[in-house]
Image (cartoon, grey):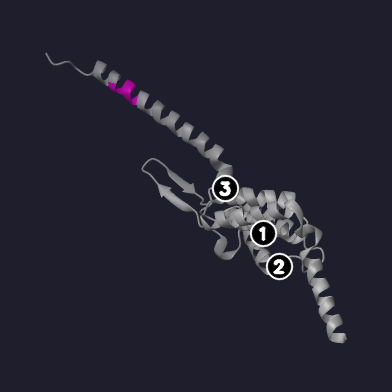
Amino acid sequence: MKTATAILLAALLSACSVLAPENLGPDAARRDDLWRQGHAAMQRDSFRVAMAAFQRLAAEHPRVQEGREARFYLGTLYLEPTNPAYDAGLATQNLEMYLASDTARGRVTRRPEAETLLGLSRQLALPCEQRAGPLRCDPVVVARSDTTVVVRPGGGGDQSAEVARLRREVAARDETIRELREELQRIRNTLAPRPE
């Protein structure tokens, strides 16, 4: 009798987990489809598609396992160096949200990896000179005959406006120098003695 009761109890418990509300209905199929799309796109290195799938999954299903795990995958995708949308700040944000969703300790399956990646993303979000140890980058000195420029690697897209402004200033300066040289040559030609 105990064996029959144990088998019945095991069958009921497994049915409860399979028939849980989050595993039923069109939402579960949609959630699973987004999950598969995200992973398939990651395998193809299609970052934009993978990130879109995981963002939808995290936004539409934040309370289920796949929705929480989507935050972890978004954090890793934002840290991928070959990703055109690389952003250490967004990686930090997604990994923090992933770890914050672990209110009962144990709901998040990749806690050690997420904590390590979170520390790395926080360091990469800092300017080069403020980073710790091996993540600190040395400035590169570029010397030209008329000037010396110190370029600090890293920094990312935040500096693109500054780089564009500096390039415009250099182009304007070069144009002024060219015009002044032409004027100087014209003056020299005017003052030079003419052969008779």
Residue name at image x 67 percent, y 64 percent: 114
Q: CA distance from mark 1 to mark 3?
A: 16 Å
Image quarter of residue 22: bottom right
| Residue 43 shows up from this direction | yes
Does the magenta stretch mainly form a helix, a strand or a loop? helix
Mark 2 lies on a secondary structure that is loop
Q: CA distance from mark 3 to mark 2?
A: 25 Å
| Pointer 1 or 3: first along the chain | 3
| Pointer 1 or 2: first along the chain | 1
Which one is in front, 42 or 94?
A: 42
Residue name at image x 69 percent, y 51 percent: 30
Q: Amino acid at mark 1?
A: Phe
Mark 3 lies on a secondary structure that is helix
Q: Quadrant of the N terminus?
A: bottom right
Q: Which mark is residue 48?
A: 3
| Residue 129 shows up from this direction | no
Q: Amino acid at mark 2?
A: Thr
Q: Range of the magenta residues? A: 180-185
* Residue 94 covered by magenta stretch: no
Image quarter of residue 112: bottom right
The residue singled out by tag 2 in the image is 109
**Badge 1 vs badge 2, beta-carbon distance below 8 Å:** no
The residue singled out by tag 1 in the image is 72
Residue 137, position in %: x, y? 53, 58
Residue 122, position in %: x, y? 65, 57
